[in-house]
Image (cartoon, helix red, strand yellow):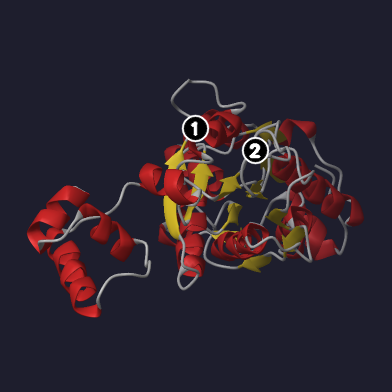
Amino acid sequence: MTINDVARTAGVSVATVSKVINSRYGVAQATSERVQEVISSLGYESSLVARSLRSHRTNVIGILVAEFEPFSTEILKGVSQAVAGTGYELLAYSGGGASGNLVGWERRSLSRLSGTLIDGAVIVTPTVVEVHDGVPVVAIDPHAGPSGLPTVDSDNLAGAVSATEHLLALGHRRIAFLGGRTDLESSRLREEGFRLAMERAQVPVDPALVRVGGYRRETADRPAHEILELADRPTAVFAANDLMAIATLEAAADVGIAVPGDLSVVGFDDVPEAAATTPPLTTVAQPIQRMGSEAIGLLVELMAGREVPTPHLRLPTRLVQRGTTATVPAGTPSSRARAAGGAARP
């Protein structure tokens, strides 16, 4: 459907239709109403590119992700709620898979979209965070942590401490840690929080119980099986995200280990899949949807030419106790130490 179709159906000139679309003066009220009725009945929408060429604005915000997975999907939910009433529309764009190279995907996406399709962008977990001259940009949970761009993330360190302290309070001492990707700041902070809580409790960390799971179910499957098949296996596993925790639950089922009777498991994120496991997953909740809505708030301020009061917004996390954690199984060194009031070494 084109602007010519609208003009022909309404019996007016293309110039008149253009004035109505762009809310310009010089069109009688009755004519404007007739054109609007035709636009509605035909389902006409003006081209974003054509609109940007005329006004240098599209009134569209880009939400750029490397891929659509549970975390980015939750971000999108928060973004869509926050954008209501701002006058902007959303364009969700996955830019990490086209070239097969995930590093630098946000640069390529911004070059492709800014100036013609979007007026500003929220970039979710970017690999490279740089000040971008094309359009205003806000980053969510960047790989390397905050830098030059306004950033929204959550308190990964405190969340990991709370997860580990929860397991320690249940009497666990032989606790495994299944880490995320080694190139991500969030992964580093979650491991740091795990080690900090263990140090505070004066419980040594066994290197054999620290593995890299890569933040995906498929990459976490093998290390999860490996730690559960050890002769002196852990009584608890803290996985640095929910997808790896779910992989751990599946590995436990494969080798006949009951959760939480024989093994406690804690995840991180609280994506919707966490509450759907059997039993439901105990996890650390990031306010993921709020991260999306806060990023939109910062971006709207930037697009209006205003400085943001908090260029780095770090949101709190909280422990959500469900059904995958319980006191340490009886008969283990950890349980004997707990009964004696001491701490067993792994």
The disc, 1 or 2, on the residue closer to the chain's N-terminal end is 1
**Cα distance in 3D space between marks 1 and 2:** 30 Å
Q: Quadrant of the C terminus?
A: top right
Q: Secondary structure at mark 1?
A: helix
Label 2 CA crowd tier, 10 Å (few <14, some 14–19, many 20+): many
Which residue matches tag 2?
180
Vertical comparison of 227 with 41: above or below: above
Q: How far from the left and from the top, in percent, is residue 122?
A: 58, 50
Residue in the picture at 25% in, 75% down: 28
Q: Nearer the viewer, residue 128 or 196?
A: 128
Residue 325 visible, this orientation? no
- Number of callouts: 2
Task: Give the farthest residue toward the front.
Answer: 26
Q: Nearer the viewer, residue 225 or 50?
A: 50
Q: Nearer the viewer, residue 217 or 97?
A: 97
Q: Secondary structure at mark 2?
A: loop
Q: How far from the left and from the top, in percent, is residue 255?
A: 47, 37
Residue in the picture at 76% in, 40% down: 188
Label 1 CA crowd tier, 10 Å (few <14, some 14–19, many 20+): few
Q: Are marks 1 and 2 in contact (CB under 8 Å)?
A: no
Q: How far from the left and from the top, in percent, is residue 260?
A: 54, 57
| Mark 2 residue type | Gly
Q: Please give left or right for residue 201 compared with residue 95 in the image.
A: right
Vertical comparison of 188 with 164: above or below: above
Residue in the picture at 17% in, 49% down: 4
Vertical comparison of 142 with 159: above or below: above
| Mark 1 residue type | Arg
Q: Nearer the viewer, residue 178 or 205?
A: 178
Which residue matches tag 1?
112
Q: How far from the left and from the top, in percent, is residue 105?
A: 56, 30
Residue in the picture at 30% in, 57% down: 18
Q: Please give left or right for residue 81 compared with residue 106 in the image.
A: left
